[in-house]
Image (cartoon, helix red, strand yellow):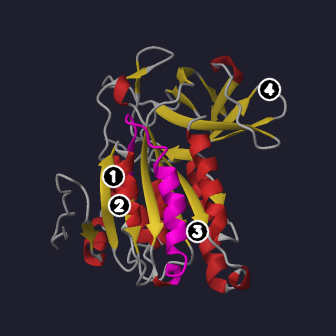
Amino acid sequence: MSATEGSHPPRRSSAGAGRVLPACAVVLAAAGVLGLPPGPAALRAQAPQRPSFRTGVDVVSLNVTVTTADGRFVTDLQSEDFSVFEDGVKQDLMFFDRSNLPIALSLLLDTSASMEERIRTAQEAAAGFARRVRPQDLGQLIDFNTRVEVAQGFTGNAEELEAAIRKTAAGGSTSLYNAVYIALRELKKIQATSADEVRRQAIVVFSDGEDTSSLVTFEQVLDLAKRSETAIYSIGLRPREEMVGKGFKEADFVLRELAQQTGGRSFFPTRIEDLAGIYSQIGDELSSQYMLGYTSRNSRRDGSWRRVVVRVGRPGVTPRTKQGYFAPAPK
């Protein structure tokens, strides 16, 4: 179903699939990026181990990945093993969860014309990733080239997600920024109303080239990503003969920055056949994360950027999470 043009963002159909988002709709929505409420979505903590929801308490939530020097995931840590610092000031954890929480995942697939000869292999790799979606998870497919289309709305049905992936076709230019922007907006709609509905949010974006047709800028997308609770995992396919090209250098920076700022990871395989293994690594990471939450000792509501650092009291391991968050804005 095509979205109509107008002063309001397009609404999702009941099925949430087949929704095309034309460039003008993206630009109209982008005009409100800087007007969004600053800061992360608030998780409310009632007990140290499980988040719940109350008014009047702003809690900073962190999804933390911990790995050894050889890349293995560390999954046996306790809350006392973690120390969290905000702008250099140690914070008190309000909750800690190391269970494999449900995930809300937006899968972005580049179907621009340059993918024509490789689209089947890319589909197969993405379909294998989609099959990991559990009934308690929510998965979405966004297909992007010149336009951005929500090919499959959020669903817990892995077969529906896989079917949508296999229907994609290559053609057109690359609207990478538009696609990431729309994915962030879609994930923002998923609001938890109880502890049982808390989901980690992630975007997995695959692209084989630089953005050539978005009307949303990279700066707008990065700002929105930093204001979200979403980890971005980026995969940039770089054919060997094009690795020295200017466009791919710019694309590398964009994909790395989106991942680094949000606590995700970036991957740059030289062969499309490596995609399946990368998707598997991302799936393993999402199932190995810790959720931490704290109430900032800084009570000022000034909308400022606050740097966050997580340390683990175990030798030889490295934690990774988002680099910070925007404080709540003044009332």
Mark in front: 2 vs 4: 2
Q: Is residue 220 above or below residue 50?
A: below
Give the secondary structure at mark 3. helix
Mark 4 — residue? Answer: 314
Please state the horizontal and vertical placement of residue 304, each as a whole percent of the image.
49, 48
Mark in front: 3 vs 1: 1
- The amino acid on which the numbered mark 1 sits, given as a three-letter code, is Glu
Mark 2 — residue? Answer: 164
Picture quarter with the C terminus = top left
Residue drawn at the location 29% of the way across and 29% of the way down: 193
Mark 1 — residue? Answer: 160
Mark 3 — residue? Answer: 254
Q: Does the residue at mark 2 contact the one at mark 1 (Cβ under 8 Å)? A: yes
The residue segment tinted magenta is 114-140
- How far apart are the alpha carbons under marks 3 and 4? 33 Å
- How far apart are the alpha carbons under marks 2 and 3? 27 Å
Please state the horizontal and vertical placement of residue 93, each as a whole percent of the image.
56, 22
Q: Does the residue at mark 2 contact the one at mark 3 (Cβ under 8 Å)? A: no
Q: For residue 45, what is the image quadrant?
A: top left
Please state the horizontal and vertical placement of residue 79, each as a whole percent of the image.
63, 19
- The amino acid on which the numbered mark 2 sits, given as a three-letter code, is Ala
Q: Is residue 170 above or below residue 296?
A: below
Is disc 3 surrounded by few (<14), some (14 to 19) or many (20+) residues within 10 Å? many
Give the secondary structure at mark 2. helix
Which comes sooner in the sequence, label 1 or label 4? 1
Judged left or right of residue 113, residue 309 is right
Q: For residue 75, what is the image quadrant?
A: top right
Judged left or right of residue 318, residue 4 is left
Which comes sooner in the sequence, label 3 or label 4? 3
- The amino acid on which the numbered mark 4 sits, given as a three-letter code, is Arg
